[in-house]
């Protein structure tokens, strides 16, 4: 287990990384002309306390300064977000005017009819061509019951297109004469050379039960060419998560975590892994890009200026796996029309090039390709090249209504395999059977692969 001493240090450091700096207009933006959206009623946005919260709070404050319109943030820990959103849309009137929905939750809200499409609020509205669509998860095709732009309607906008990157200690790699890690073999080789526990561990990502391990295992799964379901976009919900390729991916995930991560890897969450890197305890971390700003802030990180970002490693001879774990700003149906119009005004302002540049300057993750390309040439935004390259490989998972239930199953079984309660094969076979039952109850065309040998 992590020693209690280090647990206290990590929790204290977490408060620093997630702390929010006072809102200020950066000098570089002093002469910028922002979109005029007119006078709007105040709005409240349900938003998660996350690594990118500080950047968003700053840009929301800038919106208030530029427009005179009020934005209230209903900041909520991740575990409470889904239930809060569910309650909001089922009440007489939602207390939140904008819901921030994690990728796997969206279908429940799209299919349930709890949201208004953006075209309903402003006929003819379309995302600017420069705005990233993050695997088309902002669109809903009701006929196919799937998130896709083709035949779909626009239901939400992106506050980010969060993907993993590999953050690694460039100073330690340079000192040891190691190349930038590109494969899992590179990760293991670097781990063997750099690791010196308990002072320094080679690699970490989330192993905690639930969303954490499920999301952080997905790059391994995709990297080995495996998938949870055969072809959900075309109605084939045959469960494939217990394929031989999926077992190879889980075996590699467990091997790296057992050999390179700190003890008690099965309980490491996002705050833990970010702070392990921030206090100099790990050499590599597969982490969401939103963590980058905090790791590079010398007021919050002991490794500021010492880390680099790269596309996730992958198996030798295969493209790396990148999963898109983006968030969605959506408008509930049960709010007054004046509030829906105010939401749209904020959305349009937020997605402009000027606002997205301000967002990046404040530590946010911009969602415009032109902003990413133009800023990437600056040393402080060098991470944007890795992010851009990752987005080209990014894939959506859980793009179906049963996503939360599937995530819950995988989050349990993967964790049991990591901590040794189940073998990898038994965990995947068990998960596959349980996921198949979920789809069967929903009336999907489903089935199972032959079980893996146990």
Image (tube, rainbow, N blue to C red):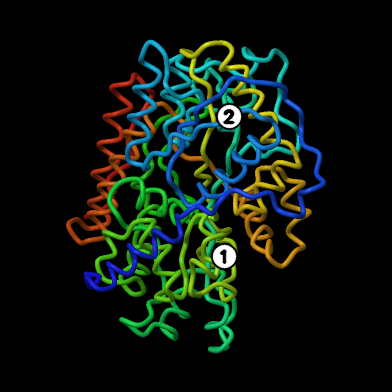
The location of residue 118, given as percent across then percent down, is 62, 19
Circle 2 sits in a helix, a strand or a loop, which is it? loop
Circle 1 sits in a helix, a strand or a loop, which is it? loop
Dividing the picture into quarters, in which one does residue 340 lie? top right
Residue occupying the point 65% across, 43% down: 367
Q: Is residue 245 visible?
A: no
Dividing the picture into quarters, in which one does residue 386 lie? bottom right
> How many residues crowd around disc 2 within 10 Å: few (fewer than 14), some, or many (20 or more)?
some
Q: Would residue 428 appear left or right of 175 to someone viewing this image?
A: left
Which mark, by number, is residue 317? 1
Observer-nearest of 324 and 423: 324
Residue occupying the point 69% across, 47% down: 358
The location of residue 120, given as percent across then percent down, is 62, 12
Instruction: Point out the tag, 1 or 2, that comes first from the N-terminus.
Output: 2
The location of residue 26, given as percent across then percent down, is 70, 53
Q: Is residue 18 visible?
A: yes
Observer-nearest of 275 and 190: 275
How many circles with numbers are drawn on the protein?
2
The residue that label 2 is drawn on is: 70
Question: How far apart are the alpha carbons under marks 1 and 2?
Answer: 52 Å
Q: Would residue 27 appear left or right of 421 to someone viewing this image?
A: right
* Quadrant into which the C terminus falls: bottom left
Q: Nearer the viewer, mark 1 or mark 2?
A: 2
Tags 1 and 2 touching, CB below 8 Å: no
Residue occupying the point 52% across, 68% down: 299
Vertical relation: 338 (above or below) 17:
above
Residue occupying the point 73% across, 45% down: 369
Vertical relation: 186 (above or below) 164:
below
* Quadrant into which the N terminus falls: bottom left
Vertical relation: 185 (above or below) 322:
below
């Amino acid at each position: 287990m992590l020693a209690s001493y280090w647990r206290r240090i990590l929790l204290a450091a977490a408060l620093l990384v997630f702390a929010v700096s006072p809102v200020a207009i950066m000098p570089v933006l002093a002469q910028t002309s922002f979109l005029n959206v007119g006078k709007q009623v105040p709005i409240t946005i349900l938003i998660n306390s996350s690594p990118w919260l500080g950047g968003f709070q700053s840009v929301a404050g800038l919106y208030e300064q530029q427009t005179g319109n009020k934005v209230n943030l209903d900041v909520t820990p991740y575990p409470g977000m889904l239930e809060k959103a569910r309650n909001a849309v089922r009440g007489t009137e939602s207390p939140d005017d904008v819901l921030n929905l994690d990728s796997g939750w969206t279908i429940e809200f799209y299919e349930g009819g709890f949201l208004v499409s953006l075209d309903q609020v402003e006929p003819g509205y379309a995302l600017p061509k420069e705005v990233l669509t993050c695997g088309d998860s902002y669109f809903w095709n009701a006929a196919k019951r799937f998130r896709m732009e083709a035949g779909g309607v626009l239901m939400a906008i992106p506050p980010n297109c969060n993907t993993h990157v590999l953050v690694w200690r460039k100073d330690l790699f340079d000192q040891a004469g190691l190349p930038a890690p590109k494969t899992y073999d590179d990760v293991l080789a670097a781990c063997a050379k750099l690791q010196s526990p308990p002072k320094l561990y080679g690699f970490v990502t989330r192993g905690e039960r639930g969303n954490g391990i499920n999301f952080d295992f997905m790059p391994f799964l995709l990297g080995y060419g495996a998938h949870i379901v055969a072809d959900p976009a075309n109605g084939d919900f045959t469960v494939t998560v217990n394929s031989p390729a999926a077992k190879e991916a889980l075996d590699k995930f467990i091997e790296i975590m057992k050999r390179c991560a700190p003890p008690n890897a099965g309980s490491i969450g996002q705050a833990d892994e970010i702070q392990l890197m921030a206090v100099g305890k790990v050499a590599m971390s597969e982490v969401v890009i939103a963590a980058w700003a905090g790791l590079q802030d010398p007021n919050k990180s002991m490794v500021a200026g010492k880390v680099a970002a790269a596309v996730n490693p992958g198996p030798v001879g295969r493209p790396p796996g990148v999963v898109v774990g983006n968030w969605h700003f959506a408008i509930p149906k049960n709010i007054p029309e004046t509030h829906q119009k105010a939401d749209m005004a904020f959305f349009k302002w937020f997605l402009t090039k000027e606002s997205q540049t301000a967002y990046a300057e404040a530590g946010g993750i911009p969602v415009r390709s032109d902003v990413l390309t133009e800023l990437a040439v600056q040393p402080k935004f060098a991470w944007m090249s890795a992010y851009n390259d990752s987005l080209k490989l990014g894939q959506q998972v859980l793009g179906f209504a049963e996503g939360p239930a599937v995530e819950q199953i995988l989050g349990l079984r993967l964790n049991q395999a990591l901590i040794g309660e189940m073998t990898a094969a038994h965990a995947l076979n068990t998960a596959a059977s349980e996921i198949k039952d979920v789809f069967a109850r929903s009336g999907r065309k489903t089935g199972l692969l032959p079980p893996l040998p146990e």
